[in-house]
Every structure is written in C-alpha cells, then in structure tokens.
Amino acid sequence: MLNSHLSFFTADAPPAGGTTVVKNLTSIIQYLVSNLSPPPMSLRVGIVGLPNVGKSTLFKALTRKAVDINNYPFCTIEPNVGIVSVPDHRLDVLAAFSKTEKIVPAVVEFVDIAGLVKGASEGEGLGNKFLANIRETDAIVQVVRVFENPNISHVHNIIDPVNDVDVINTELILADLETVTKRRDKVAKEVRANRKGAAEEIVLLEVLLSGLESGKLAGEIVLPGNPDDARKLLKELSLLTAKPFLYVYNMSDRESSLPEALASRAHVCLDIKIEEELNEMTIEEQEEFGIVSHLPELIREAYSLLGLMTFFTTGEQETRAWTILRGSTAPQAGAAIHSDFEEKFIRAEVIFWEKLIEAGSWAAARDQGILRLEGKDYIVQDGDVMIFKV
C-alpha cells in the first residue's frame, strides 16, 4: 500500500482506480521527505567578456523577471548570481490540463563574472577572482562586442570581435597551461616512483599540453586511450577551457553577416540594448512596436549546451519541469526528485506530454494503452511525463 501512496504523491497524479488517502504515519513521513528534499542539480553558466561589451546589461536583462527561489533550495543567493527559468510552453499546457495550483519551471543560474582584461592569467585587473569564479561554473557564455558606438569606449580602442574572442580564450588557455604543467611535473615524479597509472596519465597530460600550446581549447583536444580515464582527468583538473562555450554576439543588427571565425562557433546573436529596453515595456507596447525578445533563445541554448533535457510531473497540486542529463535512465531521472527514487526504483508510468494532452485525461490514456510501464533500463525522453513507483 505504501508504494501506491508514494507513486501518487510523487507525480501528483491520480493512480488507476481513483484517489488514494494516506492512512498511516509512515506514508505521511515518506510523502514529506520526498517532497521537501531539494533537487540535486545546480547548473551555473558564467557570463564573461571584456569591459564594455554588454555583459552586465545582459545579466540584468536575463534576471529582470523574478523567480521564486524558495522552489530551488540548491541555488546560491549572491548579488552576481541570477536564477533564470527555462522558457517551456509544454509546462503551461500541462498545468492547464491538470488545473495546477503551482507551476515550477526548470532553471539555470547565470553568474555575472568580473570583466576580464589581457593579463588576467597573471593576475592583472581582477584576474585571480575572474578565474576562480569561472572555475565554479558548468559552462561559459562569452559576450562579444560586434556593434559600433563611438560613445562607448572599447578597452582596445578598436572594434575587432575576432581579436576579442582570441584575447579571452588565450587568457583561459594560459591559466589551463599552468594547471596542466603543475600536474605534469607532479606525475613525472610519480612515474619515476612507479606509481600505478602514472605512466598512462602523463601521456594524456602531454597531449593536453601540446594542444593548449597550439591555441586549442581543452574541450577541442582529442585525448588518446580510455575515454573514461580522460573524462576523470579533465574533471580533476577543472580546466576552464574544457567547459562548454556559447558565444553571444552583441550587435545592433542581428541580421548582418558575421566573419567565418565567429559564425563557425556555437552562438546566439542579440541586440542587448534592445533587450534592456524591452524589460521596461509592457507586453502591449512590445506588440505595438513589433519587437520580440531573443533572450529565450539564449536561455534554451545554454540549457542545451549543458546536455540537459526535461521531464515532467503534473497534477492538481503542482506541475514541475525536472532537469536531467540526456541519456538518463528512469531511475537516474527519479533521483532528480529524491535519491530514494533511484535506489528503490521499481518501475515508472510514462507518457509523452502531447499524447497525454491528446488523450484528455489520465484515465483515458490508460484505457487507450498509451500510458506505458517502463523498467530500470528505460532511457527517458525529453518531454516525458512520469509517475514513479518505488
């Protein structure tokens, strides 16, 4: 009987046969534990760039719309950290379907990192703080100035976005070179001492050093040998340039062409000044002027950049978007709600969100046979609506 209580309250959706009533204290405690435990995934995207490129203006535009932080106990509240909801129309459709009291979207934390200058890797400007802050992020959004404006100075006194990208990436590469060199020197001693695994590790470190010295980002370097060993080493080193990069080109004309050196990179084009002005307008004024914000595109791209996807739980009490890594199994997805759901997973009822809407109700979905029972090996798909049995 306890299993049915857990599946019912977790998904906030009625099980077959109608409403279930909690009849004992154990069920109540299990319900409270599973609902009050914080989600484990905190996702941070650092916004970096040279001075006067629009970095802080972008941060303000992104974080203008308040998010109820009480729903995300894993998030850190700091002046330079903004919690931004991931735009997802599916959440609103499911909430309307369930006549939901509370909607909880997926979120990404954006961190406004101090402006970088040439020499940051050697401590210039706020270099040390810059590098420490960026090391704590999961991905990097690099804001690059493409627009011309004589009233806004450029730190290099010339508008050259390709060079600006090279300046920032060079500083990050130099910082990584220092990290890898120190590790290589340490491991070289361990090779002489016949430490197990040291000989294999130093090969990877030498390949990393060679790639970084040639100007490549760590994430672009193909390491030999076992991919798991390479991933483990990169994680231990916490290299800045091993993180995913997304470039935001700040340009007054989003439709203008870009040099191949910029266009070939993963990017989003924004007029950040317009985005700032849109925040001051009502929806009616935006429609009157025919201006559309492109910030949702940036947020979605940042979410995708981290290899993330969303599954849903929905019911009268709450409709929520849960963040998981692509390729997650059903038990791993359950862990986003509570660790017990991975350890004690039995099975899950699964239906694609559109199929649930088309069916018109949970009961109809069951009658039509489109509400499936999936086991531990099921790979969750983006847009799945799930009820966990534990």
Image (tube, rainbow, N blue to C red):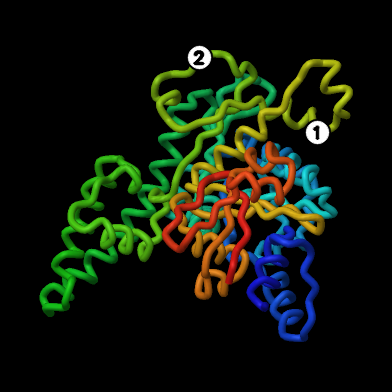
| Along the line of sight, the residue nearer the viewer: 234 or 86 | 86
Q: Amino acid at mark 1?
A: Asn
In the image, farthest residue toward the top: 256
Give the numbered dot on residue 316.
none
Q: Residue at x 58, y 63 (%)?
A: 336
Counting residues from the N terminus, which is met first, the one under dot 1 or under dot 2?
2
Q: Position of residue 164 (x, y in %)?
A: 47, 32
- Callout 1 environment at 10 Å: few (<14), some (14 to 19), or many (20+)? some
Q: Residue at x 66, y 25 (%)?
A: 271
Specify whether 297 is left or right of 171: right
* Residue 310 is at least partly visible in this image: yes
Which quarter of the picture shows residue 147?
top right
> Quarter holding the C terminus?
bottom right
Measured in 3D between alpha carbons, the distance from the residue under mark 1 to the one under mark 2, in whole angstroms, is 27 Å
* Residue 48 is at least partly visible in this image: no
Specify whether 295 is left or right of 245: right
Vertical position of residue 49 compared to residue 348: above or below = above
Q: Position of residue 148 (x, y in %)?
A: 61, 19
> Quarter holding the N terminus?
bottom right
In the image, farthest residue toward the bottom: 25
Q: Amino acid at mark 2?
A: Ser
Vertical position of residue 55 compared to residue 226: above or below = above
Specify whether 18 is left or right of 164: right
SS at badge 1: loop
- Residue denoted by label 1: 279
Give the numbered dot on residue 257.
2
Q: Residue at x 55, y 52 (%)?
A: 372
SS at badge 2: loop
Q: Position of residue 50 (x, y in %)?
A: 55, 39
Which quarter of the picture shows residue 18?
bottom right
